[in-house]
Image (spheres, rainbow, N blue to C red):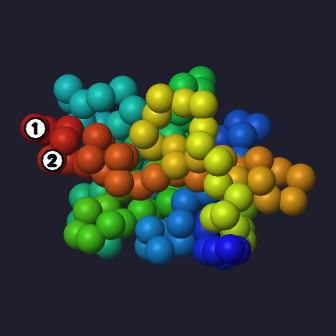
Amino acid sequence: MVVQVPALLFMLGAQEYAVLIEDVTEVTALVEIVTVPDTRPEILGVVNRHGAVLWMLDLRRVFDQPAKPVDVSTLFIVAQRGETQLGLVVDEVRQVEYLDLSQLQSAPTTSEAILGIITHGERLIQLVSLSPLLTQYSPVATNG
């Protein structure tokens, strides 16, 4: 059975990833990041987003890719589940496409943040699971 779901595609290096559109609030360019001492290396710091503090997560570091400098041209995805938000720093935001979840295959990874890999045309796209990222990197997890 074909189950088409909208997902936002993005790049980290040469790898293509997707996050379900239901988990995306907006895509925006980076503003000034304030570093916070004693946080995990994957946390770049916090930004002021519409008067609220938003924690910024470097997905390159989460997915074991070399860190890359961030600047005002760097894009990030504001992901949200319930009341919890997290900024996901990525290399490039592509577009929204409908992915066939019946094509989802388990990924040979120990990362809970990857639901699996989807064949989409000639491309392989890793589908990101937002819940483990929020659990591991939200302010409660960072400070607790």
**Secondary-structure class at tag 1:** loop
Which residue is label 1 attached to?
Answer: 144
Q: Position of residue 90 (x, y in %)?
A: 58, 47
Q: How many marks?
A: 2
Image quadrant where residue 112 sits: top left
Question: Which amino acid type is shown beneath numbered disc 2?
Answer: Val
Which residue is label 2 attached to?
Answer: 140
Left-right relation of 15 to 54: right
Left-right relation of 96 to 109: right
Callout 1: few (<14), some (14-19), or many (20+) C-alpha neighbours within 10 Å?
few
Image quadrant where residue 85 sits: bottom left
Visible in this render: residue 15?
yes
- The label number, if any, that marks residue 14 in the structure image: none
Question: Which amino acid type is shown beneath numbered disc 1?
Answer: Gly
Q: Position of residue 114 (x, y in %)?
A: 52, 44
Q: Classify 66 as above or below 142.
A: above
Query: In this orientation, which residue lies closer to the viewer: 140 or 124?
Result: 124
**Secondary-structure class at tag 2:** helix
Query: In this orientation, which residue lies closer to the viewer: 103 or 112?
Result: 103
Residue at position x 59%, y 24% in the image: 66
Callout 2: few (<14), some (14-19), or many (20+) C-alpha neighbours within 10 Å?
few
Q: CA distance from mark 2 to mark 1?
A: 6 Å
Residue at the far front: name it.
Answer: 1
Residue at position x 13%, y 38% in the image: 143
In the rendered image, which quarter contains the N terminus? bottom right
Q: Classify 29 as above or below 62.
A: below
Does the CB distance between marks 2 and 1 fall below 8 Å? Answer: yes
Query: In this orientation, which residue lies closer to the viewer: 120 or 64?
Result: 120
Residue at position x 77%, y 47% in the image: 124
